[in-house]
Image: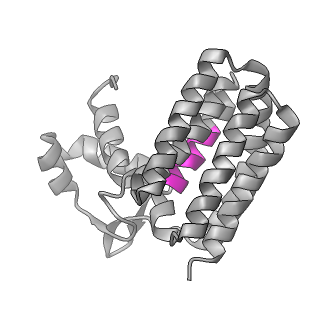
């Protein structure tokens, strides 16, 4: 990935550490340590952290310090309602616009997701889950829609590992739901794909509620 400047570079590096759970929810974040590791001054680190605070991936706790955000399940439930509204629109447009080359690429992402989840590599599977939905949004040819979906997918990629306790039945269900969604899109089955993406997102609500 190319970056427009040092600020963008540091922002994406810190954000990547959050999303791949190198920095875990609730963990203290030290500006000087990140600056040292990235071999930059503290100024771009501070700017990156402020940007991530605005995106609610980092929290500034007065008199305590800077921490990776701990997002409640209740907040995630509310975000799922937003996801349904956004992603049903994205899937509808994707079915109209996706090319044969696009269906091959989407299927390839799904296969990587299936393998990672089957192998118990949950953090990597979570990122690929988000990548499926980001790809669909990208095909929709609506930049604002894609931006909103990317932002909310960042939150779910960040939190999914810590909010879902995977079991064999949950793994099978998630693989099946994503397979059906991808196949519907590949077949340009707009109504079926819209219903399936709604089902997929609702299944996340079930996974969250079954955490304990």
Q: How many marks?
A: 0
Give left or right: position of 27 versus 158: left
The residue positioned farthest toward the right in the image shown: 191
Whether residue 127 is visible here, answered yes or no, is no
Does 199 sit above or below residue 208? above
Residue for point 12% across, 40% down: 39
Q: Is residue 88 magenta?
A: no
Q: Is residue 114 above or below residue 33?
A: above
- Asked whether residue 115 appears in the rendered view, the answer is yes
Which quarter of the figure is the C terminus placed in?
bottom right
User: On the rendered structure, is 95 left or right of 64?
Assistant: right
Give the answer, above or below, for where 100 lies relative to 195: above
Indicate the position of residue 148 as horizontal and vertical percent values.
63, 40
Residue 152 position in % (x across, y down)? 59, 49
Residue that appears at 65% across and 44% down: 179
* Model colouring: one colour
Q: Residue at x 34, y 22 (%)?
A: 4
Please provide percent x and percent y for residue 206: 69, 69
Rendering quarter of residue 44: top left
Quick one: 198 or 27, which is closer to the camera? 198
Q: Nearer the viewer, residue 173 or 211?
A: 173
Segment tinted magenta in the rendering: 148-157
Q: Nearer the viewer, residue 108 or 157?
A: 108
Could you say which is closer to the camera, residue 49 or residue 107?
Answer: 107
**In the current view of this chain or complex, which residue is farthest to the bottom?**
212
**Residue at 67% in and 37% down:** 182
In the rendered image, residue 88, in percent from the top left (x then y), is placed at 78, 41
Q: Main secondary structure of the magenta part?
A: helix
């Amino acid at each position: 990935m190319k970056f427009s400047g040092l600020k963008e570079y540091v922002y994406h590096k810190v954000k990547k550490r959050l999303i791949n759970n190198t920095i875990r929810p609730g963990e203290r974040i030290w500006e000087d340590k990140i600056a040292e590791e990235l071999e930059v001054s503290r100024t771009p680190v501070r700017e990156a952290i402020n940007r991530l605070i605005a995106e609610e991936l980092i929290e500034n706790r007065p008199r305590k310090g800077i921490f990776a955000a701990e997002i409640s399940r209740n907040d995630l439930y509310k975000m799922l309602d937003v996801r349904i509204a956004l992603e049903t629109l994205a899937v509808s447009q994707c079915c109209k616009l996706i090319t044969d080359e696009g269906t091959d690429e989407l299927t390839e992402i799904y296969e990587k997701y299936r393998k990672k989840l089957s192998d118990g590599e949950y953090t990597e599977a979570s990122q690929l889950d988000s990548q499926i939905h980001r790809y669909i949004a990208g095909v929709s040819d609506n930049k604002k829609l894609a931006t909103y979906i990317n932002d909310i997918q960042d939150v779910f990629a960040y939190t999914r590992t810590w909010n879902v306790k995977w079991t064999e039945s949950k793994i099978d269900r998630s693989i099946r739901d994503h397979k059906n969604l991808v196949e519907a899109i590949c077949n340009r089955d707009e109504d079926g794909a819209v219903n399936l993406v709604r089902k997929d997102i609702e299944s996340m609500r079930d996974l969250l509620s079954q955490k304990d």
